[in-house]
Image (tube, rainbow, N blue to C red):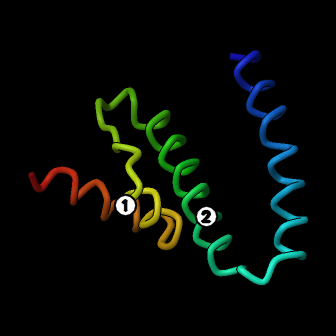
Amino acid sequence: MAEKLSLLIAVALPCLGVYFLSMRLTPHRGLLRVCEKAVIGIVVIYVLNLVLLPFSVSLAPNPLASLATGYLGFPGAALAFVMQNLK
């Protein structure tokens, strides 16, 4: 687990630096905001899956669910869960 965390940190820090540099240097901030919200949504879904694993509940990390979670937060995750179980 510690190896995965250190690998995640080793990948996240350069990405974070590139992100902040690109936010200042590019005029296409709207696209970067969408990417930022998608990544935030993926991280929140991953954490929720870890927390809800003992209850046998999971969210599929698809693009629509990650965007809904990134823009709306936990209500977006609940919306993604409802949409997933409507099938």
54 vs 8, nearest the viewer: 8
55 vs 14, nearest the viewer: 14
5 vs 17, nearest the viewer: 17
Q: Is residue 59 left or right of residue 10?
A: left
Q: Is residue 50 left or right of residue 79?
A: right
- Amino acid marked by disc 1: Leu
Which image quadrant for residue 34?
bottom right
Which image quadrant for residue 36?
bottom right
How far across and down, in percent of the image, does residue 30 sit? Answer: 64, 81
Please report the residue visible at 83 percent of the width from the left and 53 percent of the height from the top. 16
Q: Is residue 3 left or right of residue 72?
A: right
Q: Is residue 10 above or below residue 59?
A: above
Please report the residue visible at 75 percent of the width from the left and 17 percent of the height from the top. 2
Q: Is residue 1 above or below residue 66?
A: above
Q: CA distance from mark 2 to mark 1?
A: 12 Å
Per the image, label 1 sits on a secondary structure element best described as helix
Please report the residue visible at 9 percent of the width from the left and 51 percent of the height from the top. 87
Q: Point out the residue furthest to the left here.
A: 87
Per the image, label 2 sits on a secondary structure element best described as helix
Q: Is residue 43 left or right of residue 81?
A: right
10 vs 45, nearest the viewer: 10
Q: Is residue 17 above or below residue 4?
A: below
| Label 2 sits on residue | 35
Q: Counting residues from the N terminus, which is met first, the one under dot 2 or under dot 1?
A: 2
Q: Which mark is residue 64?
A: 1
Crowd rating for badge 1 (residues with CA inside 10 Å; few <14, some 14–19, many 20+): some
